[in-house]
Each structure stands twice: as structure tokens, then as C-alpha cells.
Amino acid sequence: MEDYCITYNDWKPEEQKLREALCTLGNGYFATRGAAEESSNDAHNYPGTYLAGGFNRATTEISGKRIENEDFVNFPNWLCLNFRPEGGEWMDLNQFKVHEYTQSLDMKKGLLIRAFRVEDSQGRCTHIQSRRLVSMHDMHLAGIEWQLTAENWSRDIELYTALDGTVTNAGVERYADLESQHLEPLNTREVDDESLLLMVRTRQSKYAVALGARTCIYHQNSKIDTLKETHQREGYIDQKHRFKLTQGEPYVIEKMVALYTSRDRASAEPSLEVCKDLKRMGRFKKIWLPHINAWEKLWRRADIGVIDGDKTQELLRLHIFHILQTVSLHSIGLDVGVPSRGLHGEAYRGHIFWDEIYIFPFLNLRFPEITYALLMYRYHRLDEARYAARQAGYKGAMFPWQSGSNGREESQEMHLNPKSGRWKPDDTHLQRHVNAAIAYNIWNYYQATDDIAFLSNFGAEMFFSIASFWASRVTYDEARDLYEIHGVVGPDEYHTSYPDSEKLGLNNNAYTNVMVAWLMQKALHIKDRIQKSRVRELMNDLNIDQQELSLWEAISKKMFVPFGENNLILQFDGYEDLKEFPWEAYRKKYDNIQRLDRVLESENDSPNRYKASKQADVLMLFYLFNLEQLKEIFRNLGHDFTQEMMERNIEYYKARTSHGSTLSRFVFSWILYKYDKKTAWQNFEKLLISDFEDIQGGTTEEGIHLGAMAGSLDLIQRVFTGIEVTEEALWIKPDLPEHVQKINLQIKYRHHWIAISVDHDKLRIAFEEGYSNKVNIGVLDQIHTFSQGEVRTFDMSGR
């Protein structure tokens, strides 16, 4: 690895699908996996192209039931490029001798580079160097450049280039029994002597996509004439170029690609736009230079510099890179959410969960305009959330656990356990805490940006609608004189019902209850923050009266929180009655018990019977709120909360968590950091490599884990650097691990750009520019007023 580059120096077919996911190139509009151009879908390769918001619904019969799923569609493969000597074999790295192979992901420039030497069965050696990009400057363009040199032979060759719309969704093995045909062909044609056009449409959502490719061959910087043959069949078009290859002479092949859809703005019709771009785009270098400039601008805002003498820097930049390929400035006009597995594969069907809660902190302080667009994705689906609440018998808005095209609940009804091979009902849709997460994201976006216009016009409407839902969802317990929430599932996910009960859901999940109490407190705060006229409009539009506002107030102060002995916050009512899980016995029995739910189901058992969690549940509260905030929340609920209580709960649940989610390591690293830095750092190191080394054993190749990637960045900025946004100021309270020598970053706080550099001896803060000449920045325990252009250095050596 180099600072901005991931390099593989060998050809390992068995690792190719993982490398494809990690070497994906994208621009927030579409992304293509890092599959070799000459490859096709087989045991070791899976070319895949995904469009932001590119969903389609299909029905499959499973266990006698017709199940409809909305899938993230694998769109046509535009990579197809290969060659063979006349009468010889098409290049195949699995069949040829591979003498040299290097593959590099240049994250600074957004390029995928391959250089390799191969030998066919006739002893002919060929060297190929390729560069590939998906343009960050123009979201519709992509390109491939090959430099091909015959090292010990001269002969006529055949070059193959194609657009393949016959692809299916086959990137996740456990979905193999589900309907995978999502595309229907519309049109193929030869645009001109060098250019091909393919049009397809999704079968249910009627999402039309046009792809065009222009392929040209150059020798000594001049385009050469070739003999061409074009072949077409339904959903597929290819072109074969024949020309003479001279030994030792490099030939440059450029495949320039344009992609448009029926949902694009400022677009006449997809195929017309594609043809226009094919004529205008010029050579590879013409789109390469503005693409590199676009990435340079992004890195100036996004980079986090970490010096620790290890590979932390490169992995952090890998995480930044994939976030900005999934959601970029191009996302602003697309009406899309942020898929938890990126635009990198088909896992989780491209759905939008609550991972925003981990991703937004990074975006809020660098690209708040992207956060705004992603929050508007939720706002545009507010009516669907209201309908879902009404159908369930509640008021307000009930956002889905899994969201896709229109905001309905997309959680699958049946889930395949790959260990047992059985299909089982999936009950995780009862994770209603996603509603609280959306409210939390609204508030924290406002905190970071001071965007009162968004809060008044859109944020408050969502926030009040969510509060109204919970007000209608709670149950009042007269004996306790407290409010309760029944029939939900917490973040843990392993516990979806009580042992041997056929009734779904649990009562009084502590995380959900506390979040609802906080939400009610903040809803009343927002009511006092925005204009009174806007409050009157919202109360009228949302049918909220003074009686309901009084209920919000009561819930914020009288929400039940289940406690056990020694001030242990119980994960839910009845948690103390569950059995202790035999962790050591199962660790000896199985190599990996991270996915304990699958292990137990294969044994006809269930985690519902045990004190065993997939990931942080109660402990999520300690990630979202600092100690002082928790003291205030619990004080409003009539409870004391102390550092000792926090540590006791952390120790208890740490011993009962399997880390079945990549997010779990992140949360544990965060919450352990203040009092167990060694274990926290170990979790941080696991988090850094979780996708790069695919520690879950085959999940990364189905799509990267965007929440975990963003979490690693958030740990750097909010834990190690100590950045905290509050209403009165931006606070910086560094607490560097001993492994880290220095951190450099810049953030955007309420329209002000602030550069921060910190090591173990000093903290340097520069107020670089902003919309006003003053900004309040708190350092350690004192607020300082900075003037624009001012730089100050603070002594950290005595801490």
C-alpha cells in the first residue's frame, strides 16, 4: 500500500470477488465493480454495475408463499473487452500463464490500474496495461484505456468489445432461489462505425437505461482503421475489430462509455443523450483530466491525515474513497438514500437502513449538502411513512426498517440461513428505533450546520411526525405510572421475541425507550426554536393539539427504563430471565461464532433463549450521547446516571456480544476508549481491516459495509481528535491513542472552514474562512472566539 493506493502484486482468482468489491469505481450516480474487463460471471468473477436508486421488484414462491422483494439491480456490463491472436484463444487469466500481475486502486485519482504479462498455449507473450475510471466530473461518463504490446509475436488479432444486457442478479449466493431476472431488452444498434448502443428497462419499475460505447484503436497516437463486425441478439451487442499487431509496438485501445436513465434531469431521452456524449467526449485523456481535478477537490475537503507508522492512513482513505463513490455531490439531485452496502454489490438488496446514523457525522462536517440531500430522501417518503403508521393503527409517521424506491417497508419476509439451508421468517422489521435514528440525524445535521431553514421547512415536520407516532405507540402502565413500548426489536437483532412465544417483539427495549424519551425532549425544544407561525402550521397540518404536546412532555419524563441489579440497564423487560450462553464451549466447537443466530438455528435453537447479542444494543446509548448528555436524559426520567454505571454496563454486555455486525466493533471501540484504551484500539484495528481482509468470511465481496467504514472516520474525528458540536460552540478535546503520532483534518462547522492539527504536545487550530468573521471554538474546557484567518496553538503536553 501507498498513502492513496491499494496494490495487489499477484493474481489470485480465489480472492478476485473481494478485490472486485474493494476496487469498485463510482461517482454517486453509478458504480462498477473492479472486475477484469475480460472476465464474466463465474466462480471467481462477478462484474456488476449499480445505479443509485436502481431498484426493481420481483416475486418468488418460497415454502408455498409468494414473496415479493425489491432488489438492487445489476445493470448491463459495459466492461467487456478482450483479444485473441487470429486463430488463437481469447485471453483468460485462469487458463493462460500469468508471469506478472499488478492491480492498483489509485484513490487519489479515482483510477483502477492493471499491468500484467500473460502467455497463451502457443507461447505468445503479451503485456497489457489498463486504466479505468468512472467520471467524478461528469456522472454519465466512464472509460477504459488498454495499452497492448505483443512481446514475441506479430499477427492479425481480433479485439472484442461488447455491451451485455443479459446479466442477472447473481452476486449473493443465499439469494439464488429468488427471482433474479430484472432487466428486459429494449433496443440494440450500431450508432456509427465505432459506437454501439444498448437499451434495457427494469421489468417492474420501468427504469430505462441506455448505454453507449465507442471503441477505437490507436498506434503512435494515430487512430488506425480496422475491419469490423457487429453482432446483435436480444439484450446484447458486440463488435469485433481485426487489425495487424506488430511485435514490440504498443497499441492503445480506448473504450469510452456513456450511461443515461429515464430518471435523469435535464435529459431529452436516454439514448439521445448517450449518442450526443459519444460524439462529444473525445479521447480517454479528455475525460481523465477533469475527473482527476474533481477528485482533487473532494480530497481537499474530505481527507483525514493520520500518522501512526502503520497502515491506518491507507485504510482510512479507502473508507473515505468508498463513501464518496456511494454518495457524492452528484447525489444532491438524485432523490436517493445511502445504501448500507454501498453501490458495490447486491447484499441487503441495496436497501437503506439506519446506517446513516454512522455515516452522517463524517458528511455533516465536510459535505453537509450531501447530508441535506439524503435527509430529503426521507422527507420525500414521509407520506408513505404516515400511511404505514395509519395501517398499523397509529398516528404520525412510521419509517421502515428497510427502505428502497418509495419508502415502503422492504424488509424481506423470509431469510435463508446458509448454515442450515432453511428459509425462516425474518422479524427484524420491528426495529422501530429507525424512526428515532432519523430524528437524531435531523437534529445533528442542524447542530453542525445551523440550517434553520431546513429545520423549519422539512426537519421539524419529520421530527414532529415521528414524535406523534411514538406518542400513539406508547402504553401507559397505571401501576408504575410510567409509559412503556411493547412489541419492538432493538438494535441487537438476535432477540425478536420471548423464548417459546409465538408473539413477535419484545417489551421495553431500553435503547428504544430512552431514545424516544430524548426524542420527545428535542421535539419540544425544536418547537421553541423555530418560528411560532411555522409551529402553528405544523400543529394544524399534523393534527397535533395541546393535549398531545402535554403527552410528549410526560413521555420525556416518565418513560420506563428496565433496570436490574447493580444499576444494570436491562436490554429489555425479561432479559434477566434468559439463560447465560456457553461462549467458551461454542468458541471451541466452531471456528467463528460471530453469526451466532445462524449457528443456533442450524442446531434447532435460537438466541432468543440466551443473554447473547449480535451487536451493541443498550450500549448504543453510550455511542450516541456523552456522559453529560446521558446524565441529563436520565435525570429527566428520574434516574441518576454515573460514569460507574456506564462502565458496569459496558463490562456486562461486552462479555455477551458476538460482534455479528461490522458496526459492533466500531461502537465498542468508541465506548471502551475512555477507560480501556488497549481493548478499544484492538477493536479499532479490527474495524479498519473488517472489509479489507473480509473478517466475516465472504460478506465483503457482496458489498462493502459503509457504516463501519464511516465509523472508523468518526472515531478519528470525534474520539481521538475530540470534536464535538454543541449549541454554544464547536468543542475540541483531543485524546490521541499512544499509537497515533499526529492527526490533521479540516471541517466545515456552520459555514466556517476550520483546520485542526493535533499531536501529543500541541493542538493547532486555524479558522481559515467562513460566512462570518467570528466563530466560537471550545478547547478542553474554555470557549475561545476566533477571528477569520486566525491561527492558535494550545499546549497539550500537560494533559
Image (tube, helix red, strand yellow):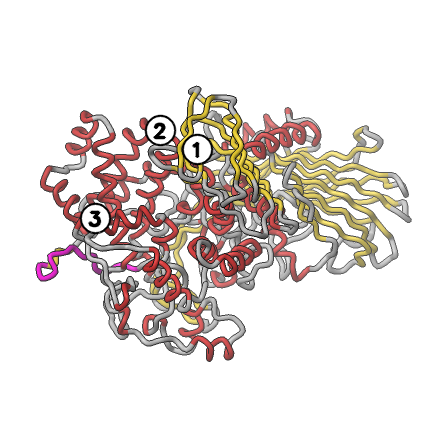
Q: Relative to 109, is 511 on the left or the right?
A: left
Q: Could you say which disc has been placed on residue 781 in the image?
A: none
Between the C-alphas of marks 3 and 1, the distance is: 31 Å
273 up-or-down from 660: above or below: above
Q: Nearer the viewer, mark 3 or mark 1?
A: 3
Choose the circle earlier in sequence order: 1 or 2. Answer: 1
Evaluate if marks 1 and 2 touch, with contact meaning CB atoms under 8 Å apart.
yes
The residue under the point 81% across, 51% down is 117
Choose the circle earlier in sequence order: 2 or 3. Answer: 2
The residue under the point 68% across, 50% down is 36
Q: Which residue is mark 3?
A: 636
| Residue 520 image point, x, y percent | 22, 44
Choose the circle earlier in sequence order: 3 or 1. Answer: 1
Report if residue 485 lies within the magenta region.
yes
- Give neighbour class at mark 3: few <14, some 14-19, many 20+ (Cα, 10 Å): some
Q: Which residue is mark 2?
A: 451
Q: Is residue 297 visible?
A: yes
Residue span colored magenta: 478-489
Q: Is residue 236 visible?
A: no
Q: Nearer the viewer, mark 2 or mark 3?
A: 3
The residue under the point 54% across, 59% down is 682
| Residue 383 image point, x, y percent | 26, 39
Between the C-alphas of marks 2 and 3, the distance is: 28 Å
Q: Which residue is mark 1?
A: 368
Q: Which of 280/144 is in front?
A: 144
Q: Which of 582/563 is in front?
A: 563
Residue type of the residue flagged with mark 3: Asn
Report if residue 773 lies within the magenta region.
no
Per the picture, the main secondary structure of the magenta-coloured stretch is loop
